[in-house]
Image (tube, rainbow, N blue to C red):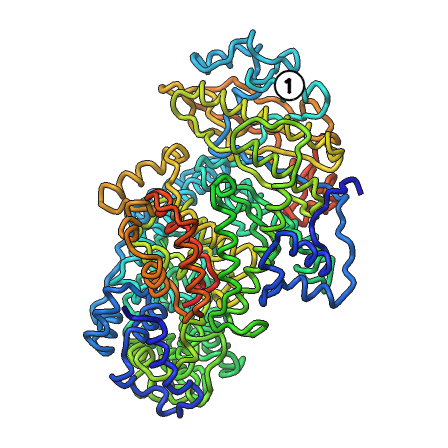
Amino acid sequence: METTTGASTSRSARPPASALSPHEAWQPLPAAHWDAAAARHLFRRAAWSAQPADIKRAVDEGLPATLDRLFPAPIALFDKPKPVAEYENGIPAHAAKLKTAATPDEKRELQKIARERSRQSLQNMAVQWLSFAARPQLSAQEKWVLFLGDIYVVSYEKVNRSDQIWTHHDILRRHSLGPAPALAKAVSRSPAMIRYLDLQASKRDAPNENFARELFELFILGEGNYTEKDIKEAARAFTGYRLDKDGGFYFAPKQHDNTPKTVFGQTGAFTGDDIIDLAFRQPAAATFVPREMARFYLSDHPIDENQLAALGAWWAGQKHDLRALAHRFFGSRLFYAPDYRGNFIKNPLQYYFSLLQDLRLDVTPAPRLTVAPLRQMGLHLYNPPNVRGWVGGRSWINSATLGARRQFAQSLFTPIDEKKINADEKAEFDAARAAGNGRFTVNNRTLQRFVDMPPEQIADIFLREFLPVKVSPGYRESIIRHLAGDGNQQPARVLARIRDTAITLLQSPEYQLC
Amino acid sequence: MKNPINTLPTTRREFFKLAGGGIGLLAFSRFAPSFLVQSTLAAVPAPERDRGILVIVQLAGGNDGLNTLIPFEDAQYYRLRPTLAIDKKNVLRLSGTLGLHPGCAELGALFQEGKLGIVQNVGYPNPNRSHFRSSEIWESASDSDRFVSTGWIGRFLDNTCSGAPGAPANTAAGADPLAVHLSGEVPQSFLAGRAHSTFGLNPDLLRRRGNKDNLKFLETLVNESTGADPGGQDNNSFLKQTMMDALVTEKRVQKVLTDYKPGVAYPGGAFAQSLRNIAGLIAAGLSTRVYFVSLGGFDTHHNQAAPHQNLMRALSQGLSAFQKDLEAHGLSDQVVTMTFSEFGRRPMENESKGTDHGTAAPLFVMGAKIKGGLHGTPPSLDLKRNQDLAFSTDFRQVYATVLDRWFNCPPDAILGKPYHPLSFL
């Protein structure tokens, strides 16, 4: 049996992050350092959880092959959910009705119905996406899309159209592993983004600076790497980006300012795409995404600027290719440094998905039991607090959100009260069950495989599968003691103790880490 | 101080004294609750315990208002409810035209004593008939076409607590949670702009055998080293400290509940037990301002009569026991209780002897300081087939009344715009 101690000795032999020169930091991890502990670290950070079968395969195949699987060439697409398509298809008819509405009241009523359809289809999309992203083979990809969405932020609260929110994420996903400039250009045409940052209000004679500002500050360069004049000039290049009556992107040449602009010291009759290319030629662009990656995947503490600069220089040489960056980052010596093992706070989605995968459960097809608990943990899907996205790290944790996490873990071990399921949820439950995705909570059958094991063995399995940190002998002893309980060997009592132990470990401070 | 039964530690010395008597491992914790650490830094003002307390009772699923407060002289009622109408002779009469469901005998008595108010026909413009969305509207107190990510209680906490600069949330006084919910899920009402100490007491867990052992086990794990450095700056220590604070609260609460001697016998059932527990926490003098408890099962689409009767009984017996218990402890002046439900039900019953999602419904307000009786106006039942009730009192008027006259908190700041208060307070 592999033990946590064994894993940690090999780990402690590794140099800390600070000991790595900027050049060494991003060198591929030596094959000899690739072990189960390293694989678990990769899967917990780059995806949602470390499943034993995945870890075994990863160790057998090696790190490069594993990265190829986590960040693959063909990207799996998330189809537009049916209710979203229905809402979208109904928009022209809705617009026609709105035109012929006789009274303001009638108009308001129609708008209300449309808003409600949009909102309900968004809820449906949220639940379907959770199921999509929970699939082990898609976890790394979808976490990466989530990461990009935390850079290219839009909020449903302002956009108000589920189809545009879907399109935005579809754009992120399609471009997620290609060149970063192509992603930025595609996002500048995302209807949700155009609405969110008021690009459609930008006129030739009155350019709106909101988009140009965030493009430089939050999407490509970071604060301090552009002047106010750069923003003013760049804003003129993005004039003419419009949404048609159905909400699709089009370019209106008449509204576009095609006179020369001076941005980053260069002058020309730049288009929006030219501006994005110019921005990526700025040195700051090379380190911006790597810095965001380090914040999202690695540590609350900023990583060494010299190390960052080395990665940036390398990335610029790769024409800002995102797949190359992901492979470099997640395959580097720095990523596996002991400083970054098991000490990062899971965001609510990570907590949610790691629970589902660790317990081999399916997404419960009801917003009340998915979207709502996530919100109680502090994450309102499709509604980040502002254009900066989520702050992350310790800001996820306070007594209320920690309580919400504990309650959610507990709820996954409590059968859903079928009497309390509302009639409109019933159909979704039945459909999920019919599709073979009906395991919403842990039942005693699931835990049966542990019943005949000695407490020591159960403790070691739980520790290895659940916790990302090395625990003290005392910690392990307490788990064994709790599993042994009063020694009552009645199967029901044994099962109850296994269940309670699992719940408590999933509520523990250590399980909040990855 | 009305309640001498305050067994909760508010100073380091008290804490350790109590720890010796059963709080256990916490006393030896290397991850000492931060309020202990902080309470040595400054003289902490005594918690204010005489301020008004609000108990919110959620009737989850959409309560059938028309069969709760019954217009027994209205022929339209009997037309709309061919099988579900309550026979005139069985209605508990409150006025010449209105009466309570026969399951509400205890609430009827409270009404006669002037301790129960009924606000009629409460709703909001452009009603939404989705459980999820309509609950969200009620709990965020938003317009139905606006999305607000905080709850009205959360904003109230944001508002009250901003007046105490520099007072950390975990000083001894602040060690009491500001709001407590007795439900499996954190109510959306509690979502706030800033972090507050709120606390959930899951009624399903309290009943479970072995829950105490689990809590103790979690506490052990929090104390066991995982390489985390006590008092250290790493994330594991931070999580351990935050969790220890939460566990301390949980322990204190459990101790209070175990020791509590109710002044009356409560009926069986989880709902009444939750109310008993709320009474216990109030009696212990917690500085908690808001309690939230949920009674579920009101989504009565099929064969409504029997289950609705049971729900009415549970509500009536539970609330009445709670009110009497508060009186027995001399606490009834401090507490106002109010009910809400995400919507009422369709006036016209459906083909399965049930009712579908509707709009407005009456809600109850209860307390010694309440102006009892009927408030607002009843709905008109002159309705077309499947037509819904048109509300006459906005639910935010109820909130505004509570905020203004019970919490002394400017309601406009919480609700975003002015609402005309009602006369029940």
Depth order, front residue of A39/B217: B217
State how many labels appear. Answer: 1
Q: Residue B424: name its quadrant.
A: top right
Q: x%, y% of residue A172?
A: 33, 66
Q: Residue B4: name its quadrant.
A: top right
Which residue carries the number 1 mark? B108
Q: Amino acid at mark 1?
A: Gly
Q: Residue at 34% across / 80% down in the picture?
A: A329
Q: x%, y% of residue A504?
A: 44, 55
> Eyeballing the image, is B2 above or below B325?
below
- Image side of residue A315 versus residue A226, left or right: left
- Image side of residue A187 versus residue A262, left or right: left
What quarter of the picture does the N terminus of chain A occupy? bottom left
> Eyeballing the image, is A466 above or below B253?
below
> Eyeballing the image, is A284 above or below B143?
below
Depth order, front residue of A236/B316: B316
What quarter of the picture does the C terminus of chain A occupy? bottom left
Q: x%, y% of residue A426?
A: 33, 36
Depth order, front residue of B251/B319: B251
Q: x%, y% of residue A110?
A: 43, 39
